[in-house]
Amino acid sequence: MSPVVGEEHRAGITGAVERLVTGWALFGGLVLLAVIAVNLAAVIGAMIGRSFPGDFELTEMGVAVAVFAFLPYCQIRDANVTADIFTARASPRWLAAFKSLAALVAACFAAILMWRMSAGMADQRDYGYATTILQLPIWYAFLPILVSLGLLAAAALVTLTDALRVLRGPRHG
């Protein structure tokens, strides 16, 4: 696997963002493990005739939180899905230009989603929406998702500066 553009130079604020993003992804992994445990308990409970109330609600909220928690990590580690067949013969400068554009799009995407998700969270809270069985307020799930989107924006800015550093560097092709 090729190294992440600029990864070897990350220190200071960019290094701190990377460590924060990595820790947040680990949190997402723990949430996913908790979802698995809930589903395991629900299956075992069904086998012995004891239900697990709210397992679908917890799964729905947990998976949403986990998926959003992984987005900043994918961005900062350059692990997003790409179509490398189109860039296989591109020079490092062209690749850096494409990565700059992708990072800019990711930062804008994160900012727009953060804006709209915060409005959605406010609506969910104001109207008192809750899950049917457990009566958990739905807006609780929005809090870690908003943190994830903030970290995605920060990760996108880090990868943007990394790619721009490559673009400003010496010209080799």
Image (cartoon, rainbow, N blue to C red):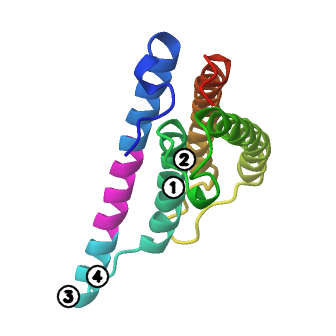
Q: Which residue is mark 1?
A: 67
Identified at 69% across, 42% down, the residue is 102
Mark 1 or mark 4, whichever is nearer to me:
1
Mark 3 or mark 2, whichever is nearer to me:
2
Give the CA distance from mark 1 to mark 3. 31 Å
Label 4: few (<14), some or many (≥20) within 10 Å?
some
Q: Main secondary structure of the magenta part?
A: helix
Q: Position of residue 104 (x, y in %)?
A: 73, 35
Question: In the rendered image of this protein, does residue 129 appear above or below residue 76?
Answer: below
Q: Is residue 70 left or right of residue 1?
A: right
Give the CA distance from mark 2 to mark 1. 7 Å
Of the 4 image quadrants, the one containing the C terminus is: top right
Q: Which residue is mark 4?
A: 43
Q: Which residues are magenta?
A: 27-38
Q: Are marks 2 and 1 in contact (CB under 8 Å)?
A: yes
Q: Tell which of 123 and 113 is nearer to you.
A: 113
In this view, which residue lies farthest toward the left? 48
Mark 3 or mark 4, whichever is nearer to me:
4
Mark 1 or mark 3, whichever is nearer to me:
1
Identified at 47% across, 58% down, the residue is 62
Mark 2 or mark 1, whichever is nearer to me:
2
Q: Are marks 1 and 3 in contact (CB under 8 Å)?
A: no
- Secondary-structure class at tag 1: helix
